[in-house]
């Protein structure tokens, strides 16, 4: 196995957006795939009340301001893990996690999270730069949480498989 995935010369790890509470619409920062073959987008949501579904999508654009943005690229590789609350009603560190097995989704332009009123969800989306249309280099995660009454949500980009070996890879946000 060649090297360490998270060594600074092999990957960039950055927050897509600050952790949000009760935010109906959240758009992450635009990040460039120009220097990386792959990007993992990790989204975690924890709900504390009744609400509608959360819909995730990834958009593409020409630059970091969203010029020429195309809404909803096809997500060919994504996985979900829904943590159902314990039957005793315990939450937090005392709650029992039912499973740690992720379910692979079928290709789609959106991923929908629909869990019980008190539950946590984890979604991992793997974007390959070759899946972007020409001449798009930038991607952005977008969440629509319109009906969720109380939830925390956060997202992280993990840029990996650099196109060129460099001690300090160039920025992905400029």
Image: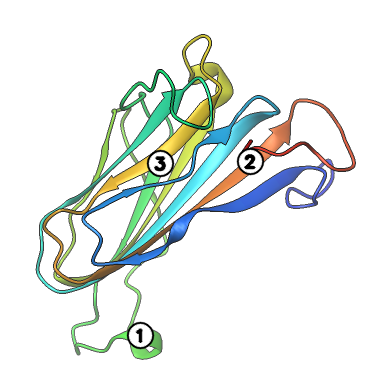
Residue 114 in picture, x, y percent from top left = 17, 54
Kindly indicate whether the residue at mark 2 contacts the one at mark 3 (C-beta within 8 angstroms): no
Residue that mark 2 sits on:
159
- Furthest residue in direction right, as rendered: 167
Residue that mark 1 sits on:
92
Q: Residues within 10 Å of mark 3 (few under 14, many from 20)?
A: many
Quick check: 99 left or right of 5? left
Residue 41 vertical position relative to residue 90 in the rendered view, above or below: above
Taking depth in this image into account, of 173 and 139 the one nearest to the observer is: 173
Counting residues from the start of the chain, the first of labels 1 and 2 encountered is 1
Residue that mark 3 sits on:
141
- Please report the residue visible at 18 percent of the width from the left and 61 percent of the height from the top: 115
Numbered mark located on residue 54 in the image? none
Dividing the image into 4 quarters, which one contains the N terminus?
A: top right
Taking depth in this image into account, of 11 and 2 the one nearest to the observer is: 11
Nearer to us of marks 3 and 2 is 3
């Amino acid at each position: 196995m060649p090297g360490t995935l998270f060594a600074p010369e092999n990957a960039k790890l950055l927050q897509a957006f600050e952790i949000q509470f009760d935010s109906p619409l959240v758009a992450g920062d635009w990040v460039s795939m120009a220097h990386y073959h792959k990007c993992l987008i990790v989204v975690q949501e924890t709900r504390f009340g009744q609400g509608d579904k959360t819909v995730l999508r990834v958009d593409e654009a020409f630059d970091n301001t969203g010029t020429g943005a195309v809404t909803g690229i096809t997500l060919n590789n994504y996985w979900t893990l829904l943590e159902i609350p314990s039957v005793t009603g315990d939450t937090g560190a005392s709650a029992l996690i039912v499973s740690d097995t992720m379910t692979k989704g079928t290709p789609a332009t959106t991923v929908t999270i629909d869990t019980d009123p008190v539950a946590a969800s984890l979604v991992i989306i793997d974007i390959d730069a070759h899946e972007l249309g020409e001449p798009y280099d930038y991607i952005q995660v977008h969440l629509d949480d319109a009906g969720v009454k109380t939830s925390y949500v956060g997202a992280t980009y993990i840029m990996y498989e650099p196109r060129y070996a460099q001690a300090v890879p160039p920025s992905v946000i400029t």
